[in-house]
Amino acid sequence: MPVAHLKRWNLSIGDGQPLAVIAGLNVLENLDLALEVGRELKAVCAELALPYVFKASFDKANRSSIKSYRGPGLDEGLKMLAEVKRQLNAPIATDLHEPYQAEPVAAVADLVQIPAFLCRQTDLIVATARATAAQEGILHVKKAQFIAPWDCKNIIDKSREAAPGVEIVLCERGSSFGYNNLVVDMLGIEEMRRLGAPVSIDATHAVQLPGADPRTGGASTGGRRAGVPIIAKAAIAAGADAVFLEFHPDPDSALCDGPSCLPLDGAAALLKTLKALHAAVRA
């Protein structure tokens, strides 16, 4: 019966718990935008009695082009996330890319996220598991696009060998078969839950079209925004414990992954539907 606990926020993800919402911006653009998005999403989740975690990246290291916007970087980004955390009074999720970032990131973020392409990097997993456990946070690991769901056992084993008792949530975000496409196998969600960790669905990145943004001639990632609610609903019906979503007041002007981003004004309707579906599945 997998459950992960974030004790300092009295928040749990997994069996017997309400649908957890990890949502915010793809990447930090500025403090005002982060607060605007965070306040709206927190209010929606409060109205629906859903636990909420604000998400935004301080750096997007895996970019199609060297010219792509990456974010404010580690130092400025963590300062911004700490201020968002203070003003929203909400837990924070963000990702990291190198072992030296683990301790400063875990000191600010409550959910520390391993990007999918890096989930087999042993040094990164070990450093992040130890830093996250020391801060009593949750390690949120995205399943790589190139591994099977049951291969996530090795990720869990590494993490718990490095930091016994570390709280872990696995994240499904699709598998790559090349040709600028990703496919989500919904049967994999239960396979991952059987490993003893709750599972989230990253419905935003699951609809990416890597290297296929027609606006830039393939110099950035495209996406199928209309598919995000479909993936989210299907994954929750398949047993996902949490949903990971990215919003923007004007998705087409977002500095990163706009084609996969949802409009902020649609958050309430979507989350209401997802809550009802989660309740029906768990009844």
Image (cartoon, rainbow, N blue to C red):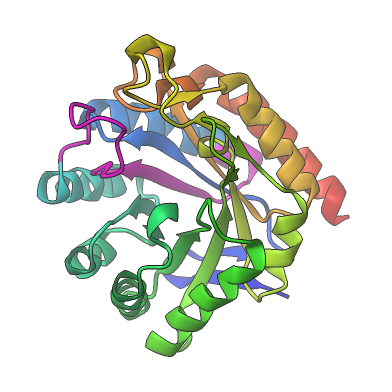
Residue closest to the eye, 249 or 175: 175
- Image coordinates of residue 244 in percent, x first then y, are 54, 44
Residue closest to the eye, 101 or 87: 101
Residue closest to the eye, 88 or 117: 117
Q: Is 159 covered by the magenta stretch? A: no
Is 31 on the left-hand or right-hand side of 48? left
- Image coordinates of residue 234 in percent, x first then y, are 76, 40
Q: Quadrant of residue 206?
A: top right
Report the magenta stretch's main SS: loop
Q: Over which residues does the magenta segment extend? A: 45-72
Q: Quadrant of residue 178?
A: top right
Q: Work out whether residue 261 can be spotted.
A: no
- Image coordinates of residue 165 in percent, x first then y, are 48, 86
Q: Work out whether residue 235 can be spotted.
A: yes
Q: At 32% from the left edge and 80% from the top edge, which residue is drawn?
A: 130
Q: Is 46 covered by the magenta stretch? A: yes
Tell me: residue 6, above or below residue 218: below
Q: At 47% from the left edge and 72% from the top edge, which residue is drawn?
A: 7
Q: At 31% from the left edge and 22% from the top edge, which residue is drawn?
A: 219
- Image coordinates of residue 180 in percent, x first then y, are 51, 30
Is 170 on the left-hand or right-hand side of 246? right
Count up the numbered dots.
Answer: 0
Q: At 45% from the left edge and 32% from the top edge, which residue is drawn?
A: 210
Tell me: residue 50, above or below residue 260: below
- Image quadrant holding the C terminus, namely bottom right
Q: Quadrant of residue 28?
A: top left
Residue closest to the eye, 27 or 20: 27
Tell me: residue 242, above or below residue 226: below
Is 194 on the left-hand or right-hand side of 218? right
